[in-house]
Image (cartoon, rainbow, N blue to C red):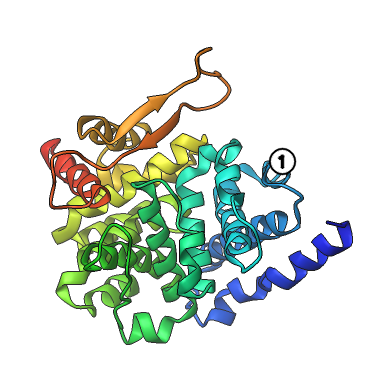
Amino acid sequence: MSDVWRALRRWMLTPDTRETTLARRGFPVKDEASRQVLETVGARFLTGFGYAAQARTPTEAADRLETVPWQWRGFAYEGAAMALAIMDGLPLGGGGRVAAFLAGRADRHTYMVHVGAGWAMARLPRWRWHAVIPADPLLRWLALDGYGFHQAYFHTDRYVRRQHPIPVRWPDDPSGVHAARVVDQGIGRALWFVTGTDVDLLARTINAFAPGRRGDLYCGAALAATYAGGASEDELSALRRYGSQHAPVMAQGSAFAAKARVRAGLVTPHTGVATSVFCGMNPHEAAAVTDAVLASEGLLRREVGAGGPDPSVPPRTRTADLPGGTPLPAYQLWRQRIADQMVSLGRC
């Protein structure tokens, strides 16, 4: 493929950066600092999307992604995953780009990559979803989170103000009950942006939803607050008070965000402030809880080659559904047990 065609592909596929500004989206501006955070997140996401859309290979995309300022790099990898998944999902587009991406340095950002695949699902017809749903039986649930985020972010009136549910058929959940909960986690993440990190408005927005949906929404909001930033310690503490009834799942969401940043080596000072508020521990401790639950539930097996692990690359992981016929999908059980563990540790 020629350089001209790749540049044209990037131009055709990459959304306009103006689509991620608070003014264009109609989201409130709490203050200049939070506006800059949220709009930088969107801009870096699209930077990553553009790099992947123009790259010859996923490896070349990763090379360019590593030039993104470190604190924003995870969002760039998320955007790149969206672009690669869209190309995987286009008719006659071939496939395997996201898998090849994850086989390289993107493995450090595996959580963000799986979320990015969900963004692609929102831009593709459902009959093409099979081409982009990730293979990992545990982490592919994160694509539903990305899908929910996209829908709330770009179709705010329908899915936030009018609170329409988003029914989804999912390979591991024929009923759609559990899939809807993960979609709501993504909607909760989007609400951090939709409300401009104004925690008073965020709480009012969540509390307008049906009671059965609020826990997952607060979980997603705490996840976004921890990973993206944009609020002070006092504001995060206020959010925790507003969601006190859902404190264990807020701790779980914050721990997920901490794990994503710890795994990628991108922990910011704000990450520690947020996990202290929501989890009562530092980011590495919160991330360790997520890993401990995976190990204790038999969801994680480490794999290294015959020659031993490469110290420059984090241990590769493969997940598998739980044995024993548990009534909950593995991903939901993982979330629940993390929340339970936070309660057992006296952190909620």
Q: Quadrant of residue 262?
A: top left
In the image, residue 142 above or below residue 121: above
The correct choice, above or below, for 339 with respect to 33 in the image is: above
Q: Nearer the viewer, residue 250 or 276?
A: 250
- The percent coordinates of residue 219 (x first, y second) are 28, 58
Side (left or right) of 122 relative to 62: left
Left or right, 9 with respect to 225, comes to right
Q: Quadrant of the N terminus?
A: bottom right
Q: Can residue 284 be seen by looking at this rendering?
A: yes
- Res. 197 visible in picture: no
Binning the other alpha carbons within 10 Å of mark 1 as few (below 14), some (14 to 19) or many (20 upward) gives: few
Q: Amino acid at mark 1?
A: Asp
Residue 261 x %, y %: 46, 41
Find residue 276 and report its image quarter.
Answer: top left
Q: Nearer the viewer, residue 132 or 10?
A: 132
Q: Which residue is mark 1?
A: 63
Closer to the camera, 345 or 14? 14
Residue found at the far front of this picture: 92
Q: Residue at x 50, y 69 (%)?
A: 128
Where is 271 relative to 54, above or below?
A: above
In screen coordinates, is 257 left or right of 245? right
Q: Residue at x 13, y 46 (%)?
A: 326
How many marks can you see?
1
**Element type where label 1 sits in the image:** helix
Location of residue 311 by image quarter: top right
- x, y percent for residue 119: 50, 65
Q: Could you say where residue 140 lies in the image, as x and y percent from the top left?
A: 39, 52
